[in-house]
Image (tube, coloured by chain):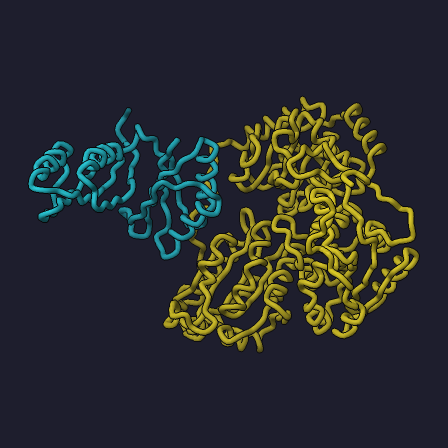
């Protein structure tokens, strides 16, 4: 079972080490961890995707809550959150395959950001499953390089 | 008016009521030591930084105040790491200061540079690298707050040399501004207390299981009231020793791997287990699936993360044990459990702690019993780690809290002796005994120089069996007596060593000389090392084999 934890922390040097270190120390598995500033420059949001059952999740949240720099920990439900990930993918291409690749990109609203004789680089933003889908479709052409940001998320405010 | 970082350091410590610090100087803390030279703060120079931090730890455990220690950068700082981990595991309020190379040189692999901030993240409650002297006062105030509040713990503050020298106008204390350090639990504590009272009312075989948290919280009084009012037997962990009088008829002594049989039987048969400031450590629970299998579980702890960490709790209560127990006590009526207490009395009669008293060797248990008798149970007992620690826990009954100084969570050999020095400094009017093993004592034996120089009158009882006894015991029982690297060979002459340092030394080889030696040590106005030459292959029993249920205990003669 995967969970998204949205953690607000005091923004200063060292806080990321404290948070990341906790996961190593207690041997919790992180799938992704993304940190960035919030609307308040003194506060950062760390979005962590963690694998484990309810008990593990409860422990992770409580242990995070104990860290001095942590202001709040919320467990975002996938169906009650907007989640996004950005990925940049460089795919091998030839004159023959180029348009096929572009077509796939267009279907998913991905942008072509670079092109050479032998490659196309596309940028895609979306929910994780969209990115997975694109990656799967592009894999047969040969993925030369890929960079992913990891997941960021915010809880939905609209009524369900 | 401006003040230098070093001046701010000393003044702020004094403002926080610090009168004693333990430390070892060096290049990167020279400005601080220069300020200490003219200050009223007592600085105790240990012979190793590990000695300084363990002494500060012992001081903190017996006084309840934050222990303070200081070391220089690089190796000085890294020598603090074991002590930090030790204090972290046992929730001891401690503030450790390390000097650091000047800010401009950090990251250059400079002489005596170590990334102590990075190194100590996993073993501190919080830590700081102070790069700007304007932040120093705030950091110091926060550190005292963090170390002492909630679940206490160690804080490390790394201060580069230039920050100690630079001057600032910002040296006055301000209100602390930290995120609340506990995640608010949505449990309504009043409602939980009612539920707990109801559960206690309905219980037929309740047991109180009390850990170090009860001592930290100062909950001994309401604990005793509750136990007596509701007629509930009390077992404590190693860390909880002394929270409830061990001579009290309701006391079951310690539970767990080397606990009493009656404590382990009582927990196994209990229908309600009330855990107070205890964390269900593996040394306590044995096989978790068979731990208190018939009991509903109430858990009082200040740390919400301890609730249901190891075992599912039925009634969690997050908060200060003293407050919660006091409230709980008011809700309860007097109650008796004659059948349950009879059953326990029967176990106590049938399965007392015992050892083989035949033969003319000195038994280590006998030494502890004699120390108990001669000191009338009123000493502060520090221990090393291993057999000595377990025998001390089993045979030195304590009736008051903050009197047992032992490395529970981390199990740090070499802790007891420097910790006993700190304890004696904290409680100069009490007798302080370090019950040691010959192995452990040799890990921090150099602190004899500290005790002698500062006239810190501690007594060290070495239960000298020539082995790393607890490891040897495991090798005997679980590894077919293959004593791999546990024999210490010919013992060093501890009496000569003690005398060489300027302390007193006594060697005891006959049982009848045990008591006179203890008396002589107490009458000697010096640190005294008593070298008790005890039976080499004596084992600690009862013993729950690792992974076994706690009611399946090995006893004398088993496993051989």
Is B501 located above or below residue B350 in the figure?
below
Position of residue B334 relative to residue A151, above or below, is above
| Occupied quadrant, residue B427 | bottom right
Where does residue A132 sit, x and y in percent of width and height? Answer: 25, 34
Residue B13 or residue B374, whichever sits in front: B374
From where the camera sits, is residue B142 visible?
Answer: no
- Give chain B's shade: yellow
Tell me the cyan chain: A
Q: Residue at x 12, y 41 (%)?
A: A111
User: Horizontally, is B185 left or right of B432 in the view?
Assistant: left
**Which of B68 and B448 lies nearest the eye of the viewer?**
B448
**Residue in the image at 32% along x and 52% along y:** A42
Point 51% across, 66% down: residue? B98
Residue B19 spot, x, y in % from top left = 61, 66
Q: Residue at x 21, y 42 (%)?
A: A143
Q: Position of residue B511 (x, y in %)?
A: 90, 55
> Can residue B115 be seen from the camera position used here?
yes
Horizontal and vertical percent position of residue B315: 57, 29
């Amino acid at each position: 079972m995967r969970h998204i934890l949205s953690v607000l922390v005091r923004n200063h040097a060292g806080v990321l080490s404290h948070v990341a270190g906790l996961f190593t120390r207690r041997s919790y598995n992180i799938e992704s961890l993304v940190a960035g500033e919030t609307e308040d420059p003194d506060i950062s949001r760390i979005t962590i995707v963690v694998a484990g059952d309810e008990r593990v999740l409860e422990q992770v949240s409580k242990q995070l809550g104990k860290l001095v720099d942590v202001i709040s920990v919320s467990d975002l439900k996938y169906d009650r959150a907007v989640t996004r990930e950005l990925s940049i993918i460089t795919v091998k291409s030839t004159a023959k395959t180029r348009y096929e690749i572009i077509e796939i990109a267009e279907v998913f609203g991905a942008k072509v950001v670079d092109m050479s004789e032998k490659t196309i680089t596309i940028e895609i933003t979306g929910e994780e499953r969209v990115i997975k889908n694109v990656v799967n479709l592009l894999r047969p052409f040969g993925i030369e390089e890929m960079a992913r940001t990891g997941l960021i998320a915010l809880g939905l405010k609209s009524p369900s | 008016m401006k003040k230098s970082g070093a001046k701010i350091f000393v003044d702020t410590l004094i403002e926080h009521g610090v009168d004693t610090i333990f430390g070892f100087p060096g290049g990167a803390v020279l400005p601080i030591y220069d300020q200490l030279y003219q200050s009223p703060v007592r600085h105790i120079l240990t012979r190793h930084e590990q000695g300084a931090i363990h002494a500060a730890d012992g001081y903190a455990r017996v006084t309840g105040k934050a222990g303070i220690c200081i070391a220089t950068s690089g190796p000085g700082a890294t020598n603090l790491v074991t002590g930090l981990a030790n204090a972290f595991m046992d929730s001891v309020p401690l503030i450790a200061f390390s000097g650091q190379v000047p800010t401009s040189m950090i990251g250059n692999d400079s002489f005596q540079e170590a990334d102590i901030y990075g190194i100590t993240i996993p073993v501190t409650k919080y830590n700081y690298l102070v790069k700007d002297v304007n932040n120093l006062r705030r950091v110091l105030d926060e550190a005292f707050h963090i170390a002492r509040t909630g679940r206490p713990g160690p804080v490390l503050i790394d201060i580069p040399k230039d920050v100690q020298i630079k001057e600032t106008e910002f040296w006055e204390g301000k209100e602390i501004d930290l995120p609340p350090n506990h995640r608010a639990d949505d449990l309504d504590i009043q409602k939980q207390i009612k539920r707990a009272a109801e559960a206690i009312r309905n219980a037929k075989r309740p047991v109180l299981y009390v850990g170090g948290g009860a001592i930290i919280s100062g909950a001994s009084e309401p604990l005793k009231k509750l136990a007596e009012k509701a007629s509930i037997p009390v077992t404590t962990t190693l860390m909880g020793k002394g929270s409830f009088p061990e001579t009290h008829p309701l006391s079951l002594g310690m539970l767990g791997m080397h606990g009493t049989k009656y404590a382990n039987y009582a927990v196994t048969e209990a229908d309600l287990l009330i855990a107070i400031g205890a964390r269900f450590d593996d040394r306590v629970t044995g096989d978790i699936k068979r731990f208190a299998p018939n009991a509903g579980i109430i858990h009082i702890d200040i740390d919400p993360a301890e609730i249901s960490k190891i075992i599912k709790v039925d009634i969690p209560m997050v908060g200060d044990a003293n407050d919660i127990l006091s409230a709980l006590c008011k809700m309860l009526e007097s109650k008796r459990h004659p059948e349950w207490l009879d059953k326990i009395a029967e176990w106590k009669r049938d399965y007392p702690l015992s050892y083989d008293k035949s033969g003319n060797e000195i038994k280590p248990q006998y030494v502890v019993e004699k120390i108990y008798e001669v000191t009338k149970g009123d000493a502060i007992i520090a221990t090393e780690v291993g057999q000595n620690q377990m025998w001390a826990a089993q045979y030195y009954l304590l009736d008051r809290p903050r009197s047992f100084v032992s490395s529970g969570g981390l199990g740090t050999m070499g802790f007891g002796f420097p910790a006993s020095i700190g304890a004696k400094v904290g409680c100069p009017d009490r007798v302080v005994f370090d019950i040691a093993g010959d192995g452990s004592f040799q890990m921090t034996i150099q602190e004899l120089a500290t005790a002698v120089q500062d006239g810190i009158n501690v007594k060290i009882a070495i239960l000298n069996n020539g082995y790393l006894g607890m490891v040897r015991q495991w090798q005997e029982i679980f590894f077919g007596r293959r004593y791999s690297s546990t024999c210490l060979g010919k013992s060093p002459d501890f009496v000569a060593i003690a005398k060489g340092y300027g302390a007193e030394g006594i060697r005891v080889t006959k049982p009848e000389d045990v008591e006179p030696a203890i008396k002589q040590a107490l009458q000697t106005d010096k640190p005294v090392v008593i070298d008790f030459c005890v039976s080499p292959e004596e084992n600690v029993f009862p013993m729950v084999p690792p992974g076994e249920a706690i009611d399946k205990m090995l006893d004398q003669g088993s496993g051989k």
